Amino acid sequence: MTLKIGLTGGIGSGKSTVAKIFETLGIPVYYADAAAKRLMNENEVLRKAVTEKFGEQAYKDGVLNRSYLAAMVFDNKQKLEQLNAIVHPATIADGNSWMSAQTTPYAIKEAALIFETGIQEHLDYVIGVSAPTPLRIERAMKRDHITKQDVMARMQRQMDEQIKMRLCDFVIINDEQQLVTTQVMELHKKFLNF
C-alpha cells in the first residue's frame, strides 16, 4: 500500500523545490495548485459554478481568466472563501483519486493549504518546509515579480508558519545553510522502510 505524504509550507518556503527533489527519486508528486487550475479549466461543473459566482469574465476565450479572478478575491475574504468553497472539494477529490492510483512505496501531495482544508485527514504523514521570513519574502518577490508589500499581504492570509510547522510530522529546513537534498534523502529512506 502506498503511503500518503503531504508536503506543505508558506509562500516562498521552497516546497516546490523539495517536491522536485522527491520526483528525481522516482516519487510521484501531486501539485494541488496546478491541479486546481487544471480543474477550473477542464471540469464543466467547476466552470459553471465559477461563472455563476464570479461572472462571464471569469473565463476569457474559454480559458480561466486568472488575473481577473485574482483581482476579485485578493482583498475580499468573502469572495476568496466562495472561490475556495467551489474549488477545494473538487481538488481534494481529484487528489484522493490520484493518490489511490499510485503504486510506489509512497506518494506526495504538495499543497499550501493542507491543515487549512483538512487534507491531513487523508494523509499518513505531513512534511513541512520552513524558511526564514526574509528569505521567503525575497524568493516570492523574485518568483512572482511582486512587491514586498504584496508578499507580506499574502503571508498575512496564510496560517502562521510556526503553528503550521508544529502540526507537521517532519520539517525540512530550507534556509540556504543546510542541505535540502540530504534532508529529503533521510526522509526518503525513512518512508521506504515504513
Image (tube, helix red, strand yellow):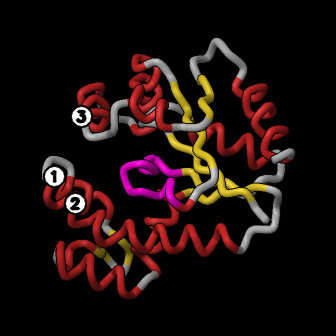
Task: Classify residue 1 as left or right of residue 9.
Answer: right
Say if the magenta span includes residue 60: no
Task: Classify residue 55 as left or right of residue 65.
Answer: left
Measured as percent of width and height from the top left, residue 68 is found at 23, 61
Q: Is 169 placed above or below 69 here?
A: above
- Give 175 or 97, whichever is nearer the viewer: 97
- Give the magenta part as a residue range: 111-121
- Residue under label 3: 153
Label 1 packing within 10 angstroms: few (<14), some (14-19), many (20+): few
- Give 78 or 136, whichever is nearer the viewer: 78
Q: Is 23 placed above or below 130 here?
A: below
Labels 1 & 2 near each other (Cβ < 8 A): yes
- Disc 1 residue type (three-letter): Lys
Within the image, what quadrant is residue 170 found in? top right
- Residue under label 2: 81
- Marks 1 and 2, how far apart in space? 6 Å
